[in-house]
Amino acid sequence: MTENDLIRKCKKGNREAFNALFSRYQSQVINIAYSMLSDREDACDAAQEVFVKVYRSIASFNEKSSFSTWLYRITANTCSDFLRKRQRGGNVISINAPSDDGREFDIEDENSSVDEQMELSERQAAVRAAINELKEEHRIIITLCDIEGLGYEEISRVLKIPPGTVKSRINRARSALKKILMKNRELFL
Amino acid sequence: MDCESFGKYLDNYENLTEQEKSDMDEHAAKCEECRAELDFFLSMISTVKSLPKAEPPSDFMDKLNARLDAEDKRVVSASGIIGHFRRYGTRYAAAAACLALVGVITANRSLLTGKMDSVPDGVIREETTVSDGSANGSGNAAADNQTAAATEEAHGTQPEAAPVPNADNTAPVRNTGDAPAVTRQSGNASSGGTVRASVPSAVRETPIRPSAADTAGEVITTPAIETAQDNVPASEPVSDAGGAEITPVNTSTDENAPVMTRSVPEGGAEVYSLQDNGSEAGYSIALASIVKGGDAPETYDLRAEDVPESLKAAEIQANYSLAGTDDNDIARGRYSKLNKDGIPIADAPAIGSIKFSSDDEERAMEVINRYTVDEEDNIYTTDSVNLRLILSRLSSEGIEYTDYTVAGNGEVKFQIEFN
């Protein structure tokens, strides 16, 4: 069944269609949320919130843009809410412990040695921590562009900013990330 | 290429052409320091791209479905209450009227007794309660008019008649349920004094004016829970935008067809005005001047559902498509009525507002965030069902809010302020 068929069924309140649609996108939404929030549990909570919002509001999706664009925009906004709540609550997420379930170390690459895998996971942990220090607009642009691999045009539609601004914001975000990672520079050389 | 240019190129890496990247490589081959910078940068990017994906927990969909089930119940429950009041509102109102009558008689017992005892100065104050508009199916009319009328109220202009059910000068209208209510308590009608409403505890009031034929100065209030409605009442003729440049937009040969003009007041938003010669009703569509990513203001479609019904009826919808957007953008343009000088009423937005005490900020935001689908620049978007849920949840959590207005059709947009 095509995505448009699913969406049409969702608009009629068909729960199976919602499940099929959400199953297709759950990984992407959780990953965007994870990159934004740097906490797996928060990411899952945010993803649930995103899908509940979609469930409530699918009728207002006018299908002029792709569903994924709409979904990613809701995801970005929901994560922003989570970050604001976190700031208000004074919660600080520590991600220096490389991961909460060891997945950061779970790199399966037969061609790399154990040492190389360890180095990579150290770099990943450092990058994850650095992303967590970025300001929100830089965090989301790095997430969408470098982690999720969205194109400039789609990012432009998700964030409602011109494509030119997407590029310049990516440059600024990467510069900021580089600055934060200077203290771990030796990991990257 | 020198090291300084290399650094600038690196900061602008995403915009570089292949040739420019090749120039960087050429320089890096000769300069160890720049080579290290480039390696560091590329290694960082490649690490970002290699970050492991988080797999959804195995029970993710189960938990989600449990939440969706809860959502279904909540929506059914909210609409059930509203439907219930709609269906049985008149019965409740009749019962309330009886109770109120008993109350009035009890409260005025001494006066009545005094009257019967022929006390010359005894005054019997009248208070009667009758069913509200939502209960008898005409409540929407009141809600329809409340936003526009509230806008007029705020600006001290005289709106067109806002039909209010049972808008008799002396008969109060009362409703205390979740359903939209118009409540009015009358003082001495002949005095023209302001009357205030009683509404469900946390549901505050948006004043609307009754019919122009009604008593001057009388204010009717309503907790506007009903779906957002058109913001532009079919009333005043509209003049041009105060000496601004005006350009005819439509070219209909029908002299009765509404005429659209575009004007650009200096430093102001673009304004599209519609003069409906047939009915002598005037409207304007003011596009908010939203500037993004440069000096050029962006314009937005006014979605068909945001266009007032009366304009749709005039079959000139094509004129509202003022600028194209190819995605699912929510209309950020706004239409508003012009004042007598032809200037858009600044605070008559298609974006409503809710004000909270800053003490309630956290709790209020939790409710708002739960039931809104989108937020940008403090403009929250939801729909009418979720708006009801927001208001109902705010009430049940004892969060007080004021200055509540909504706007938009289908989609509901509002902004939030904290005192």
Image (cartoon, coloured by chain):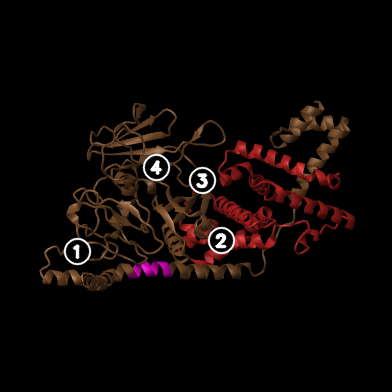
Closer to viewer: mark 4 or mark 1: 1
Instruction: Give me the chain that's red.
Output: A
Which residue is the site of mark 4?
B347
Disc 4 chain ID: B
Q: Is residue B92 above or below residue B150?
A: below
Instruction: Give me the chain that's brown.
Output: B
Indicate whether residue B368 is drawn in magenta: no
Say few, some or many: other residues with alpha carbon within 10 Å of mark 4 (under 14 / 14 to 19 / 20 or more).
Answer: few
Nearer to the camera, A40 or B90: B90
Q: Amino acid at mark 3?
A: Asp
| Residue B334 placement: quadrant | top left
Q: Secondary structure at mark 3?
A: loop
- Could you give the CA–CA distance between mark 3 and mark 4, rounded to whole angstroms? 28 Å
Q: Is residue B41 above or below residue B91?
A: above
Say few, some or many: other residues with alpha carbon within 10 Å of mark 1 (under 14 / 14 to 19 / 20 or more).
Answer: some
Residue shown at 44%/59% (left/top)? B400
- Could you give the CA–CA distance between mark 2 and mark 3, rounded to whole angstroms? 20 Å
Residue shown at 21%/61% (left/top)? B171
Image coordinates of residue B301 in percent, x first then y, are: 44, 41
Disc 2 chain ID: A
Quarter of the figure that contains the N terminus of chain A: bottom right
Q: Secondary structure at mark 2?
A: helix
Image coordinates of residue A97 in percent, x first then y, are: 78, 59
- Could you give the CA–CA distance between mark 4 and mark 1, rounded to whole angstroms? 37 Å
